[in-house]
Image (spheres, coloured by chain):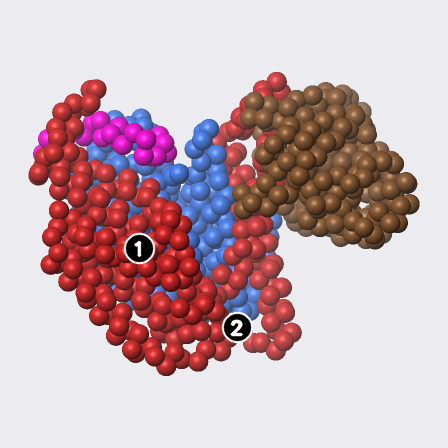
Chain colours: A brown, B blue, C red
Amino acid sequence: MTDRHEHLHTHPGAPLPHSHGHDHAHDAPLTPTGDGTIAISHLHFRYPDGTEALRGMDLAITGGEKVALLGQNGAGKSTLMLHLNGIHRPTHGTVHVAGMQVSNETIGRVRAEVGLVFQDPDDQLFSPTVWDDVAFGPTHMGLTPGAIHDRVEVALAAVGALDLAQRAPMRLSIGQRKRVALATVLAMNPSILVFDEPSAGLDPRGRRELIELLQSLTQTLIVSTHDLELARAAFPRSIVVDRGVIVADGSTSEILGNRELLLAHGLA
Amino acid sequence: MYPQLHIPDGFLSPQISLLLWVATAVLIGIAVRKTSRTDVRLIASQPILMGVLGAFIFAAQMFNFPVATGTSGHLLGGVLAGYLLGPWAGTIVMATVIGIQALLFQDGGLLVLGANIFNMGIIGTLGGSFVARGIGTALGGSRSATILGAGVAAWLAVVAAAGFTTLQLGLSGTTNIAVGLPAMLGVHALIGIGEALITVAALTFIAQTAPDILAGVSAPRKASPVRRLAIGVVIAGGVATLASFFASADPDGLEAVAEELGFLDAGLSAPFELFPDYTIPGLDGTASTVVAGLLGMIVVIGVLLALGRLARSRTKS
Amino acid sequence: MEPRGVGRDARAAVITTLAFVTAVALLPPGSYVALLLAWLLVTFAGALLGISPGHLARRGLVALPFVVAAVPIVFLRNDELLWAGSVGPLTLQISGAGLRIALTALLKAWISVQASVLLLALASPPSIVTALRRMRLPDVIATSAGLTIRYLELLRDEARRMLRARTARSASPVGVGRERIGGTIAWRARTTGNLVGSLFLRAYSRAQRIEEAAASRGATGSLSVGTLPVADPRLTIKVVGVLVLVLVLTLAGVLLPRL
């Protein structure tokens, strides 16, 4: 941890590491304040070029639920996920997250409530060090240097990446980058985590570690994936999306056992 | 919307347009001859790197820099390209980018393309890169010195490009230099700060994260103390002249400039507010501004040329 | 007219567009009749290519914001005063000559943009690069322009995804609903610089991969931009025709009444 001191030179005002030992770091800062619920009704979305990506979706997810979003490429999974964070806004219908309707009035809070982990960690990581990248969200939220320090440390510890803090993100392995990308949103203390293809590009060991990590998270989890084994391992509930509508919603074991359904929607 | 420098067709007279086409063609011709290698290392094929980095400059211009609610800055990238690829290859890449912007996106005209390449590519990248090298050398030639030099040069490049654009519009009879020049220089003095900050931050990031790529770029140059002093004096003189020009041309200082920036940002909705302090019969008052502006531009050109010559002689030796 | 294609000789299209834009630029201020003629030419050519006049006219509006540059002239010239008076605390006058200059510049820009939209409808970007190479554009520029066009959308897409990821993490302070810009200006500038630097490293490693792929196929150093298409046999006739048309337009500007 010698380079932690070096790091502090670039962040004057940050408290000394001694005052934030590990035992202290696991205190409350990452207990989500939101209730983690999602309520979507009659969601329609048309891209500016006229493509109807979502054609009437209704969905209710309770706090702490673990849901896999299944469907072939272009089915509307990514479009749906981008609605949860207000990147896209409905053409018709409403999206509520953690009790707030996503709108211009709430967008600033919605982004703190819903953490989006993108498929390619390189899209998400752009700072010279892992530490700086995890600190981006808390810094943008205007937290005090001490609070930022706590948030970063706890988030990195949660994904087992504290030792990577001073490394350059681009020098890490894909598995490490994926974990750091998760830490960048965990540091914002969201009650909902949304992942796009988390297991893409991972080797078998990286995949196993990812599954363990996902199982350890207490937030509401939504995962878009083609990896049916991942869905079976960590997500009790599954939703099948095809051509912008939800075609099946139920227990993962039931849905994955229905071969006809999987074939009909390009999942097998 | 932000005040942009891509002149569309119709705003410059054909004479000015053709004159600048000739100047641009000559300088790009020299650049093509000089481009036997790029500065960035580890890659053997220069056209591949130049082509991909052209696309990079294009895409990097999309990254906005939120200044205040509703106002954001963007990177132009001329000095950045010059730092990464070397002045000549960087100039070709910027010229290509500006050309493609005109052809594919109608961002800037075709007959005036020579002028746009001249303002942003030649003045911005070629001139800017030599200024950057001059400052870097004067400061001792370390990595942080060259990056700081690139920052100052990035600011100068934006301001100079705005000045040249206004002069060309004025010579074409499309704008009033007395009013246009201080307004454009003032606005771009602010925009240039964003350009400088982003350029410095991007280069610092690259130097920290991938020092191997920059290994051969803007390497410390051995310069005698006398030469370093000379370069320092010339640059300081240039900057001081420019600064005093700003101070004298616009007595209301940054406040007025900020007002103008606000106006330009709001678009065309309130076109009258731009000139509250320049009400019409003030031509005698503005005459001095014209002279000051022209002098300022001449000094900048002189500095750019002098630095260019210095840098060239150094490259040869 | 023939459809656009990579294999076609696009020189005639490039020369026509440049000549037309030059002719429009040559029209003196106030040549509204000649400008109307030029607009009709563009609209007619657009119709032949199946592009509606409305679409073309809308595309032409991209040059509109630049008119800010020509606004001072309207208020600062002292000739042909159309109106003088005060608006609130300001004293203003509007010069007819200034108005004419600004309006003419705007119309020229609007028509010229439409002409370059037509060029793109006639010739694909790579075929324009090839045509320019035939017209003595140096090889290093042609190659690098070709690659820039090839990788443009790819890198813009990467930039878009990076921006989206940054937006997704840009939350407001606790308790504030509306979007709020966070951090200091210097921190935000550094963040933007980091994005630019990251994109550079991605572009750089892409360039390395392209080079490796090219080298594995036996290429050394430079990439050829492909073979030149068969020269258009009627190029000379077309160019002469274009020049006659342009001359007519210029004459119209000189002879037709100006306002």
Percent from the top left, x then y, of residue A87?
A: 60, 36
Q: Secondary structure at mark 1?
A: helix
Say if A27 sits above or below B121 in the image.
above
Mark 2 — residue? C223
**Residue C133, magenta (yes or no):** no
Between B275 and C233, the residue placed more toward the observer is: C233
- Asked which quadrant contains residue A233, the reply is top right
Q: Is residue C175 above or below residue B246?
A: above
For image coordinates 48% across by 53% down, the residue present is B57
Examine the rendered structure and indicate whether residue B271 appears above or below residue C200: above
Residue B105 appears in the rendering: yes
* Amino acid type shown at disc 1: Ser
Q: Which mark is residue C112?
A: 1
Q: Which is more N-terminal, label 1 or label 2? A: 1
Q: Is residue B104 left or right of residue B10?
A: right
Question: In the rendered image of this protein, does residue B219 appear above or below residue A227?
Answer: below
Label 2 residue SS: loop
Badge 2 sits on which subunit? C
Residue at image point 90% right, 41% down: A253
Q: CA distance from mark 2 to mark 1?
A: 34 Å
Tell me the magenta residue range: B261-284
Circle 1 Cα neighbour tier, 10 Å, few/some/many (<14 / 14–19 / ≥20): many
Quadrant, the N terminus of chain A? top right
